[in-house]
Amino acid sequence: MDGQPHPAATDAASDREAVIKVRGLRNQFGRQVVHDGLDLDVWRGEVLGVVGGSGTGKSVLLRTIVGLNKPAAGSIEVLGVDVLNASEAERQSVEQRWGVAFQDGALFSSLTVLQNVMAPMREHLRMSRGLMKALGELKISLAGLPPLACGKFPSELSGGMRKRAALARALALDPEIVFLDEPTAGLDPIGAAAYDELIGELQRSLGLTVFMVTHDLDSLYAICDRIAVLAEKRVLVEGPIETMTSVDNAWVQEYFTGPRARAAQEKGLRGK
Ligand SMILES: Nc1ncnc2c1ncn2[C@@H]1O[C@H](COP(=O)(O)OP(=O)(O)OP(=O)(O)O)[C@@H](O)[C@H]1O
């Protein structure tokens, strides 16, 4: 890939709106450099799949964008706000415009599903409890959970239901961007396909932008508009999935042309 223009630079010429703009990002833990000179654009309304070998820093990238990890260098703009240099008030206001669903759900174990979904509303919105409850129930239903789930505690849910509950909480404040960290990891293939379908549906109906860290080839083929591959401490390549097979990198080749990729591609094509 050396010598090729960075895709973010070529895309900048188009009129698409970058809702996330990362430039020159460096993340380092002790002597371990995870990202160095990482650039990435995420366009409004797209589902971006972030892939890469284990330990390439996909989760660190997500955590850095949402402010849970402070980078050593670089700039991050989300919805036009320079999030690394924003005032507390600016940060709080932009944080309300995104939602995050972590891999394990990261739900409050002592709260019911409905209370979990209402938690960000309590923090950020001034409205009556009754209205929050109604909105919470709506988000829970949007995430594909039955009304019965509202009163359950996270420990009383299946893994798939916990992921949907985390998604409901991520949708609590009507976000413009949703960050998902390995949303289908640990789900059975039917559960994973249903989750993919739900994300695709929400993206289309709510106009969401989705930033999704995933290892799941089925998800990549089924719902991602573009893929960003993390390797060599940066976004090595980004583009539609069809372009990945021509990338001159051993990991990318193995990942996108292996037997699992072929099976996922066939499934994805059948589903479209
Ligand atoms: N808080 C931290 N302190 C020290 N090292 C960290 C911290 N967070 C992440 N790392 C290291 O950064 C590297 C990237 O981690 P990250 O979790 O982002 O990888 P990943 O690409 O998401 O991997 P996987 O696909 O296995 O989940 C790993 O080597 C990890 O050990």
Image (spheres, rainbow, N blue to C red):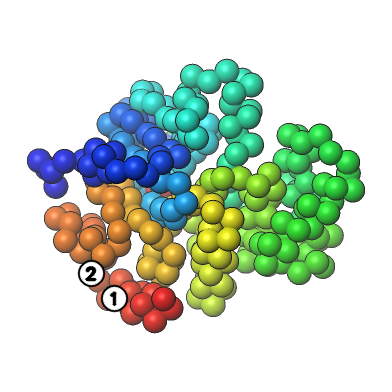
Ligand 1 quadrant in view: top left
* The C terminus - image quarter: bottom left
Image location (x, y in percent) of residue 167:
63, 55
| Tag shown at residue 257 | 2
Identified at 49% across, 38% down, the residue is: 63
Residue sticking out furthest to the left: 3
Left or right for 46, reference 242: right
Residue at 73% across / 64% down in the picture?
Answer: 141
- Inter-mark Cα distance, 1 to 2: 6 Å
Q: Give the residue number, with chain letter if any, for mark 1.
A: 262
Horizontally, residue 87 falls left or right of residue 57, namely right
Task: Report if residue 52 is visible in the image.
Answer: no
Q: Give x and y (percent) for residue 26.
A: 34, 29
Residue 238 at least partly seen: yes
Do the CB atoms of the residues marked 1 and 2 lie less than 8 Å apart?
A: yes
**Who is closer to the viewer here, 118 or 257?**
118
In the image, 126 versus 32, the foreground residue is 126
